[in-house]
């Protein structure tokens, strides 16, 4: 009996220690998460290099009709206006002609009203502005960036090249590799200096960051994602689909459907062709000079994916589908999954 009592007490002590350790660990994780959120959403936390624009981007905006109202709407939705933003290709009013897409908007409005009624504010997912990808992060309350008025932007078309500030890398951010990127001067002698100093471009960008910051150089990098979801509420719902393991489920569904794979091959091919044709003549020459064709031209597909049988990001597929690509069957399936999820949550 004494041995059993001692064993039981020892087990209880161990379990208490485990619980205490887990609670301490969860608290530590919670504090770290709160610090990251506070840092990311504090004033001035949005990287200023996200708004740098190439001359070719500014010229293209004039041709496609990018307006100041579009910039204001994107600033409200994203917290910044991407420097390689070209055109708002899909708005709420553009989805009314298709029954599935129209149903998506109707349910999103009902879902926003339900959140507003329960929480007093619509909880949306604010994009992580320190990352290039179309992924999203933590939920934070926002006051008025989830509007679904007819002119509200949903999908944004981006230029396949982006300007960035040089960065040392490490905990503060990413490290730009010179073999994939090139420093650009702001003056008109940029191209001559680049062609005359090929060897200097191959050194590590981070080693010359201080000098670059003084003379106004920037880093140019390929940006294979052509279409971006901008609406915070829609982005958050797509993220919920990813958290529910829909990526692997849809990938299995795609693998078992030959017709769907054929449609996706067409979608990937058209995506790569459109991305390449978006480049200006001067930028095409620069891309070829830097041997970036493999990043921006075929066979790279949606969001730069190589394997057409795989699914990289549901946000990219939904954005491509809502932009008007009927062949993107993965995007259509994701919208159908979202509609099913919204119907259940709006009712309850």
Image (tube, helix red, strand yellow):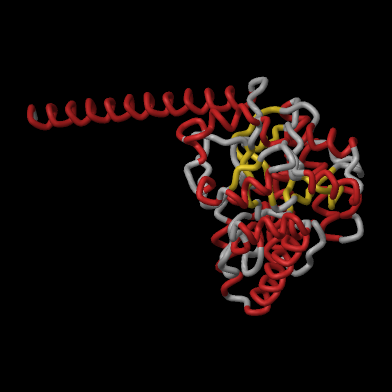
- Residue 220 x, y percent position in the rendering: 64, 45
- Residue 68 x, y percent position in the rendering: 89, 36
Closer to the camera in the image, 291 or 16: 291
Residue at 38% across, 28% down: 25
Image-based side of 61 in relation to 166, left or right: right
Q: In this rendering, is residue 286 above or below 262?
A: above
Q: Would residue 346 be seen by someone viewing this image from the given angle?
A: no
Closer to the camera in the image, 134 or 329: 134
Image-based side of 315 in relation to 152, left or right: left
Q: Quadrant of the N terminus?
A: top left
- Residue 244 x, y percent position in the rendering: 57, 51
Image-based side of 305 in relation to 325, left or right: left
What is the quadrant of residue 213 in the picture? top right
Q: Would residue 79 be seen by someone viewing this image from the given angle?
A: yes
What is the quadrant of residue 283 in the picture? bottom right
- For this orientation, the residue located farthest to the left is 2
């Amino acid at each position: 009996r004494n041995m059993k009592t001692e064993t039981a007490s020892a087990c209880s002590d161990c379990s208490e220690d485990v619980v205490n350790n887990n609670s301490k660990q969860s608290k530590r994780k919670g504090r770290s998460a709160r610090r990251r959120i506070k840092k990311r959403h504090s004033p001035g936390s949005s990287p200023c290099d996200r708004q740098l624009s190439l001359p070719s981007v500014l010229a293209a905006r004039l041709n496609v009709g990018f307006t100041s109202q579009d910039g204001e709407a994107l600033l409200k939705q994203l917290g910044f206006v991407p420097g390689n933003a070209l055109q708002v290709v899909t708005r709420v009013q553009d989805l009314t002609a298709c029954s599935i897409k129209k149903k998506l908007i109707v349910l999103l409005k009902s879902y926003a009203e339900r959140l507003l009624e329960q929480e007093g504010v619509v909880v949306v997912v604010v994009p992580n502005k320190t990352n290039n990808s179309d992924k999203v992060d933590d939920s934070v309350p926002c006051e008025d960036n989830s509007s679904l008025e007819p002119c509200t932007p949903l999908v944004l078309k981006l230029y396949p090249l982006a300007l960035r500030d040089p960065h040392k890398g490490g905990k503060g951010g990413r490290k730009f590799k010179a073999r994939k990127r090139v420093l650009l001067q702001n003056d008109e002698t940029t191209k001559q200096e680049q062609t005359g100093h090929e060897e200097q471009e191959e050194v590590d960008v981070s080693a010359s960051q201080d000098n670059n910051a003084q003379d106004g150089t920037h880093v140019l990098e390929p940006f294979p994602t052509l279409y971006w979801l901008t609406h915070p509420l829609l982005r958050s719902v797509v993220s919920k689909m990813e958290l529910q393991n829909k990526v692997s489920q849809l990938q299995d569904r795609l693998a078992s459907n030959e017709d769907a794979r054929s449609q996706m091959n067409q979608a990937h091919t058209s995506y790569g062709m459109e991305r390449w044709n978006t480049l200006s003549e001067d930028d095409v020459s620069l891309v070829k000079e830097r041997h970036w064709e493999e990043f921006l031209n075929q066979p790279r597909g949606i969001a730069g994916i190589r394997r057409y049988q795989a699914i990289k990001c549901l946000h990219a597929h939904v954005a491509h589908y809502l932009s008007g690509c009927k062949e993107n069957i993965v995007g259509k399936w994701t919208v159908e999954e979202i509609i099913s999820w919204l119907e259940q949550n709006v009712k309850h």
